Amino acid sequence: MASDTHPPKAPLARRLVIDFAIMTIVGVVLALIGPFGSFQDPLATRLIVWLGLAYAGYALYTPIDTLAQRLAPVLQLPVWTLQLASCLIATVPMAIIVWVLPRYSSGVEWPGASVALQHYLQVLVIGAMITAVFVMVRRDPAPEAAPVREPAPKALEPDTTARATFIDRLPPELGTQLIALEMEDHYVRAHTALGSDLVLMRMRDAVAELDGIEGRQVHRSWWVARGAVSDVKREGRNVRLVLDGGLEAPVSRANVAPLKDAGWL
């Protein structure tokens, strides 16, 4: 189990080397295939053009997943919808680059509407494939990042406090200083001062076992301990609670007024 609040990520330098290696392979493959009418050009020219386009695609498409993962809780939208929207938007400048770069030396003639649409859709297919590759490559594998623990069986005798019922589900090395609960599919991730772990149970069942700890469910997928809030971030109408250890929990708009009345904000 990872001892940090979040699973460790690959060092930036190593990730960049892997990313550029992938895009170099993509550029070489496209140069050999010669799409968009470029096959008649010499191979050396195709390599220069398509490697340049591959690196431009890297700059435009690889931030999509990170951006979608960060904005989804704030906008309360599914991650895939933001990935799709970002991919559609990023394809506009990419389609222009793909059209201009191979024709720069001989003079650029802009296409008509039907040709431009067909060109955009072709670039979109390749851009979506690049985005999908990097989503899969960069997504941390769940089993190594945070082993899933099955819920502990109910004790034959009731616990003295509701708090102990949930804390007993966690490994001893996480301690008892609970910071937040975060819903992940059918699991609840418990964040403590010493790390995090997954428990197979519903959020409402977990919250029902926390009557002994002062806190609130600030979002449909987040419960936060009152003593763990260190700061509040506001971006327009969006509010996020900054917690101990650097975690940020989104606050649903319906909970902003009650939290303000309770002195949280």
Image: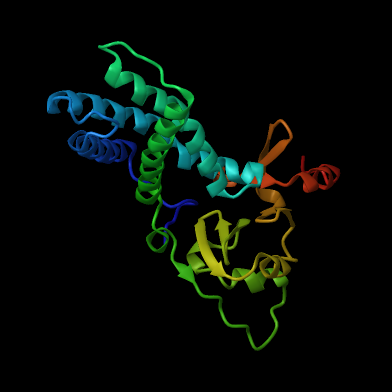
Q: Is residue 186 visible?
A: yes
> In the displayed structure, does residue 202 sit left or right of residue 130?
right
* Image location (x, y in percent) of residue 84: 51, 43
Q: Position of residue 245 (x, y in %)?
A: 55, 45
Query: In the image, 231: left or right of 245?
Result: right
Give the residue at x 27% y 21%: 102
Q: Residue at x 48, y 64 (%)?
A: 173
Up the image or down, 183 lies above or below 70; here it is below
Q: Residue at x 45, y 32 (%)?
A: 91
Instruction: Locate the N terminus and report the quarter of the image it occupies.
Output: bottom left
Q: Position of residue 181 (x, y in %)?
A: 62, 58
Residue lying farthest to the right in this orientation: 261
Q: How many labels were placed on the picture?
A: 0
Q: Nearer the viewer, residue 256 or 57?
A: 57
* 11 relative to 210, above or below: above
- The reply to whether residue 248 is visible in this rendering is no
